[in-house]
Image (cartoon, grey):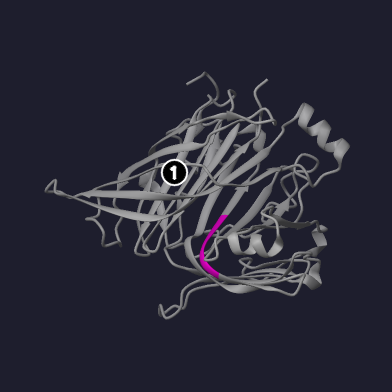
Amino acid sequence: MAAGAPVRGWKAEEVVTELEDIADGEPLTTHLLDDADYLETGTFIIFNNDGSVIFIQSIVSSVGMYTHQPGVNLKICPGPALAKARGSESPLQWSAKFARKDIRLDDSRRSMAIGKHVFKYVPAADDGSTRAEYKVALPASGGNAIGDLRATFTADSPSFMISDGKVVFGVEPEADLDSPDATSAPYCRNVFPMARAQVSGELVLADGSTLVLSGRGFVSRLLQNVKAHKIANTWSLAKFDSDHASLAYVSFLTPPSYGSQWISFGALIVDSELVAVTTDNSCATSNEVKDDTGYVVPHGTALNLSGKALAGQSLAVPGSDVFASMVWEHSSWIDKFDILSAIPWILRMIVKTFIAAPWSYRFYDPATLMVSVTGADEASATREFEGMVLREFIFLNPPK
C-alpha cells in the first residue's frame, strides 16, 4: 500500500440491521444548505423478469460545477423481448434537472418529491403484517420522455449499514467515529434500505406499449461531503440475485493521497435473511481490455467473501464462519456512459482535463454463487445458487 493519509473503513463487527429510520436519524437533505460539497443519491435498480435492467436515481447535490447532475435519472437496459420490439439493444435514457425549490420532503423526511417525480417510503407495520415499501413514480406529465413509470419496491431482507455507514478519510483506522476529528472529516456514507426487494408495477412507454415491472430490486443511499474524485479512483459493484439468495459487493480504490487502498464490504442474503456482512473480502479481476476512454476494463471477476454469521437468521449458527464465492466472465456488456454527459460540452471538457473524467461500465451475466457455512463442530454445509449478476465499474481518474 502506498503512503498517504489514513482511512477509517467499514468494520464487519459494527453492522447494524433493521434500521428504524431509513437514514438512521439523519434526514434527507440535512446538509444541503450547509455543506458546499454535499451529495446525496438514492439508487433503485430493477432486475426485471423479461431480462431488462432498470436504473432509477434521485440526486440532491450542492457540489456545484463538478457534479452539476440532474435531479432524476432513468435508464432502461432492455432485455431481449424489449430490444426486439424496439429494434435496438441500446439503452433508453432520460434525465432532468430541477431547482432547489422543486425538492419537497414529507414531515418524516423519508419521502421526497422532485418536481412531479415521487420517491415515497412506507414503513413496515408495527405488527409485522406488512413490509417496508418504496413507491416510485416518474410520470410522463413530469417530463419523463421514456413514458410513465410506477414501481413498488417491497423489502425482502432486513435493512442494514455498517456502524453509521461511514468511511471516514484522514483519520486513523481505529478512530472512534464520534470523535471530533472523525465527525469533521471528509466521508462517504452507505445505507441499504433494501439489499433485496420484490418489485411490481408498470412502465407505459411513449409509444403506448406497456412493460410489466416484475422481478427483484435493490435500493441504496449514498451520502458524502467530498467530491468523488478526491476519495476514489475506481468504484465497483457486484449484485447477484437468484430465487433464494442475493449478494451485494461494493468496493472502491482510494487515490494515492489516501494510500491507494481497496475498501469493500459484502452482504449475503439467503431465503430473505441477512446471513452475513463481510469486510474480509478478495476480488480479482481478469481479461482486462483497454477502452477508447483510456480506462482498462475487466471482463472477468473472482470474488470471495468471508465473515461471521449474524444473529436473526437460520442458515448458520450465529458467530460461525460464512464463505461466499463466485467466478464469472463479463460477456454481456449492457451499458457504457460518460457520467458528465449532462453538463455543457465546453464545461465537460474543462472538468475532464483538470479535475476528473468519470465513466461507467455495466455488465449483466449468469453466475453461480457458492455459499459455505462451518459450525462449532467444524461440520460444513455448502449450497449453490444459479442466478444473474450485475457488474458495474465507475472509473474516476484515468491513468496519466
Query: Residue 190: horizontal and vertical position, in percent?
Result: 54, 49
Q: Nearer the viewer, residue 165 or 368?
A: 368
Q: Report the residue marked by disc 1.
A: 265
Quarter location, residue 59: bottom right
Give the quarter of the image for residue 29: bottom right
Q: Position of residue 90 (x, y in %)?
A: 69, 52
Residue name at image x 73 percent, y 49 percent = 34
The single residue placed furthest to the left in the displayed view is 377
Q: Is residue 72 left or right of residue 312?
A: right
Identify which amino acid the numbered label 1 is placed on: Phe
Q: Is residue 299 visible?
A: yes
> Magenta stretch: residue 110 in it?
no
User: Within 10 angstroms of label 1, few (less than 14), some, or many (20 or more) residues?
Assistant: many
User: Who's the residue at 26% across and 59% down the image?
Assistant: 315
In the shown orientation, is residue 155 left or right of residue 243?
right
Residue drawn at point x = 86 percent, y = 43 percent: 344
In magenta, the rendered stretch is: 214-220
Q: Main secondary structure of the magenta part?
A: strand
